[in-house]
Image: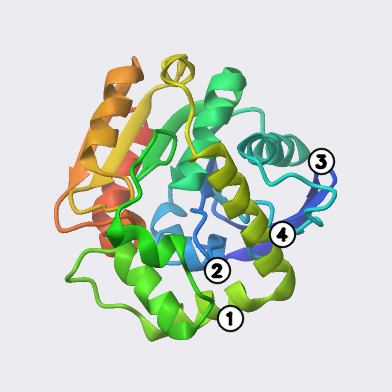
Amino acid sequence: MSSIQSRTIDAGGILTHYLEVGEGAPLILLHGGGAGADSRGNWRVTIPLLAPHFRVLAMDMVGFGDTAKPDPQHFTYSQSARVDHLRHFMRALGIARAVLVGNSMGGCTALGLAVLDPTMVERLVLMGSAGLTTEIHKDLLPVVNYDFTRDGMVRLIRALVNDRFTIDDELVTYRHQRSLEPEARRAYSATMQWIRDARGLFYEPGFIARTQCPTLVVNGKQDKVVPLANAYRFLELIPQSWGYIIPDCGHWAMMEHPRDFVRATLAFAHGAD
């Protein structure tokens, strides 16, 4: 297998960083929206497992990683902006149709494109996906009130994973350092402010029900960010949907149980439904 390539491309005026490896049909990975998130940190374990089977592309969403972070005075970090960015990314690469795999905010972004541009999405994997209203409770305060300290990053990650998960010091350092970059911090603050103003990161049920493509809903049993009830609600709303629930798993199935997650994703993405 060839090595993972780090690339950039202009996607609708946004200089966009992405990782690419493998050959064949395109499969696009979309990371979540937590502080310090990007394609490398969130998908580092998963990409090598998927690459023998697909042309894997993991993009940094606008405001994250090594992708451009426009000044919030002139750019609105809205959910529609992220959907537009994904659409422009695919068009810039000449990808007419792909399998989309999204975690959390990335899932919400993939879902938006699947509804608004159904011809562009072959199949959809929603893993711990945002898109439905979720109550903010005390377990989520380390995420909502992240204080940009290293200890704060440890608390943030601990809130996202199951209690048995061993937190990797390298990942803590990586995400903490990324979160401190001035432009990243500014973009993250603008993103979180938009979500607070919108009172969440969600679509109306009728919008979600318009999803036409086959969809796999993956959720950790112990996910505090996206509870099981949300997974079941996605299954109720999306006509062609299947569910896969992972025990001893929080919000990061791709890192907590990468092989289990990849097995389910590959079976589904190859059309074994």
Q: Residues within 10 Å of mark 1 (few under 14, many from 20)?
A: some
Secondary element type, mark 1:
helix
7 sits to left or right of 108: right
Query: In the rendered structure, which amino acid carries the disc numbered 3?
Result: Gly
Q: Amino acid at mark 1?
A: Gln
- Judged from this view, the residue extending furthest toward the left is 247
Question: Which label lies toward us, 1 or 4?
Answer: 1
Circle 1 residue:
177
Quarter placement of the C terminus: top left
Q: Which badge, 3 or 1, comes first in the chain's sequence?
A: 3
- Disc 2 marks which amino acid? Gly
Residue at image point 25% right, 77% down: 166
Given residues 266 and 117, the one toward you in this image is 117
Asked if residue 54 can be seen in this view, the reply is no
Give the residue at mark 3: 12
Secondary-structure class at tag 2: loop
Would residue 141 be found to the left or right of residue 36 on screen? Answer: left
Q: Nearer the viewer, mark 2 or mark 3?
A: 2
User: In 3D space, how far apart are the residues under numbered discs 3 and 1 (Cα atoms)?
Assistant: 28 Å
Q: Is residue 160 above or below residue 147?
A: above
Residue 176 drawn at (x, y percent): 53, 78
Q: Which badge, 1 or 2, comes first in the chain's sequence?
A: 2
Check whether the beta carbons of the residues at disc 1 and disc 2 lie within 8 A of each other: yes
Q: CA distance from mark 2 to mark 3?
A: 23 Å
Mark 3 and mark 2 in contact (Cβ < 8 Å)? no
Q: Is residue 269 visible?
A: yes
**CA–CA distance between discs 1 and 4?**
16 Å
Q: Which mark is residue 67?
A: 4
Residue mark closest to the camera, 4 vs 2: 2
Rounded to the nearest whole Å, what is the CA distance between mark 4 and mark 3?
Answer: 12 Å
Find residue 36 and name its label: 2
Identify the residue at image location x=44%, y=14%: 206
